[in-house]
């Protein structure tokens, strides 16, 4: 069966555009990276890294498909441009309005002025919601910490951390393992692993922990 190149590229463009819109919407509604990694945030089974990868690769696919589509239809496209160029000159008012609207959107987005800044403000509110409802981490990206580093950060000995984890159902074979690796092994979020420690040491759940500005410490 013969492949219709023009039809194929048109369908590819359409599908890539749909996926790009979907991944863009997912990323718009996603929490900040540190919150997403700490809570193992997912949407329809995909985490933030997966959505970012999907969005980036689909954008590349869209650009490649657009380039191929333009190449296959170059003669038609060039003829259309020449024909429309004369016609467009008769629409000076429409051309001016269209250009002005585009320039206004670009300038408003770059300068972050209302109403164009509103979309980013809504995005910030969404991120603030996720951050406010998520379990607090002792410090940003604590999921990457080894048990030794985590113990120093929260003011415990590594033995105390290890014992807390084992009592919480997270056996430790290697103290150089990170919270994320332990979470992956147990198929839970890094925040759930950390909760096994705070469950035993109640003072880690107080204001000394999970606040910005430095490592948390045990209350004396």
Image: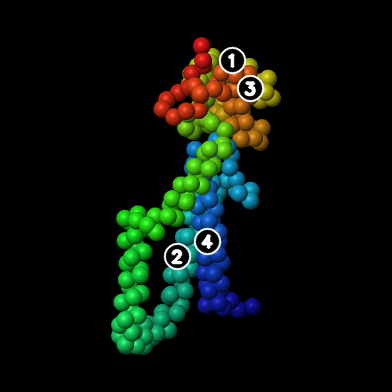
Q: Nearer the viewer, residue 111 or 194?
A: 111
First along the sequence among labels 1 and 4: 4
Q: Nearer the viewer, residue 214 or 203?
A: 203
Identify the mark at residue 21; answer none if there is no mark: 4
Residue shown at 53% from the left, 50% from the top? 29
| Residue that label 1 marks | 160
| Residue that label 3 marks | 199
Please provide percent x and percent y for residue 86: 32, 88
Closer to the eye: label 1 or 2: 1
Within 10 Å of disc 1 (Cα), the crowding (few <14, some 14-19, many 20+) is some
Within 10 Å of disc 4 (Cα), the crowding (few <14, some 14-19, many 20+) is some
Does the CB distance between marks 3 and 2 fall below 8 Å?
no
Position above or below: 68 against 123 = below
Q: CA distance from mark 4 to mark 2?
A: 14 Å
Closer to the eye: label 1 or 3: 3
Residue shown at 39% from the left, 85% from the top? 80
Task: Classify mark 2: helix, strand or loop.
Answer: helix
**In the rendered image, which quarter contains the N terminus?**
bottom right
Residue 180 shows in the view: no
Within 10 Å of disc 3 (Cα), the crowding (few <14, some 14-19, many 20+) is some
| Residue that label 2 marks | 63
Does the CB distance between marks 1 and 2 fall below 8 Å?
no
Q: CA distance from mark 3 to mark 4?
A: 42 Å
């Amino acid at each position: 069966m013969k492949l219709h190149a023009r039809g194929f590229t048109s369908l590819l463009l359409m599908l890539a555009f749909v996926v790009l819109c979907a991944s863009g919407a997912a990323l718009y509604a996603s929490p900040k990276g540190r919150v997403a990694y700490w809570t193992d945030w997912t949407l329809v089974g995909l985490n933030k890294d997966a959505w970012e990868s999907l969005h980036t690769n689909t954008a590349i696919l869209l650009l490649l498909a657009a380039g191929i589509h333009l190449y296959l239809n170059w003669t038609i496209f060039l003829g259309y441009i020449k024909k429309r160029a004369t016609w467009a000159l008769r629409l000076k008012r429409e051309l001016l309005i269209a250009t002005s609207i585009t320039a206004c959107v670009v300038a408003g987005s770059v300068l972050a002025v209302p109403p164009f800044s509103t979309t980013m403000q809504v995005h910030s509110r969404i991120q603030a919601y996720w951050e406010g409802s998520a379990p607090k981490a002792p410090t940003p990206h604590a999921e990457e910490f080894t048990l030794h580093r985590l113990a120093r950060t929260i003011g415990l000995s590594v033995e105390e951390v290890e014992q807390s984890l084992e009592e919480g159902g997270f056996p430790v074979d290697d103290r150089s393992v990170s919270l994320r690796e332990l979470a992956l092994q147990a198929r839970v979020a890094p925040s759930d692993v950390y909760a096994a420690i705070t469950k035993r040491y109640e003072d880690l759940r107080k204001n000394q922990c999970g606040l910005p500005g430095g490592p948390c410490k045990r209350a004396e």
